[in-house]
Structure formats: C-alpha cells, structure tokens
Image (spheres, rainbow, N blue to C red):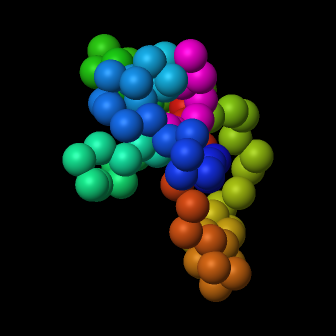
Amino acid sequence: MARPEKHMPTSLDEALAELKRDPANAVHARVEGMEVELRVVSQPPSSEMRLGDWMASAGPWQGETEDEILEILREGRRTGGSAEPPEMP
C-alpha cells in the first residue's frame, strides 16, 4: 500500500515494528536515502510432505485429460496470466 512520504518509517527498526503490527502488508521505508520494502515471505512447504499428499491438498481431480490441462495452461498464458500460483494449504 503506497503511503505519503511523511509517514514512511526512517529506520529498519521502525519498518520492522510496523510490519509486525500488520504482516499482511509490505512496508515501505526510506533509510539512508534508499527506499526499501519489507515484506513477510511464506514458509516453503514441509519437505516431509509426500508428493501424493501435496497433490491431494490442491483439491479433487476434475477428470481433465493431459491435453485439456495443457490447453487450460496455454489459455491462461494467452490471456496474460503471469501471476504466482496460489499457495498450497
């Protein structure tokens, strides 16, 4: 969320404190003449999760063939889709 410069933290400690209050939103700060952004990153999936469990967590299979899945992906790319995939539970 963009904020007026007068409200930007001026130290990393201030920015970190603000991020801890609201970890869902990145914090912009101006520190020593540089504009920096701090954000919380999600933890990678547990390496103990097996592939089948990870795939099952994505939801039920809808019965699409490989060709249908590839077409869905191609269509998403054609329409400009470049967003990160949704996070797995």
Q: Can residue 34 be seen at all in this image of the molecule? A: yes
Residue at image location 57% in from the left, 40% down from the top:
7
The residue at the point 37 percent across, 47 percent down is 30
Above or below, 23 relative to 77? above
Q: Residue furthest bottom?
A: 78
The magenta segment:
21-27
Task: Report the quarter where the C terminus lies.
Answer: top right
> Quick check: is 25 in the magenta stretch?
yes
**Residue positioned 58% across, 35% down in the render:** 25
Q: Give the main secondary structure of the magenta stretch.
A: loop
42 vs 11, left or right, is right
Q: Is residue 88 magenta?
A: no
- Percent position of residue 59, x then y: 68, 33
Foreground of the two, 67 or 8 = 8
Dividing the picture into quadrants, the one containing residue 68 is bottom right
Q: Position of residue 6 (x, y in %)?
A: 55, 46
Q: Is residue 66 visible?
A: no
Count of all numbered marks drawn on residues in the image: 0
Whole-percent x and y of residue 44?
36, 28
| Quadrant in the picture for residue 47 | top left
Judge by depth and name the residue closer to the eye, 48 or 16.
16
User: In the displayed image of the protein, which residue is found farthest to the front?
Assistant: 6
Q: Is residue 48 left or right of residue 80?
A: left
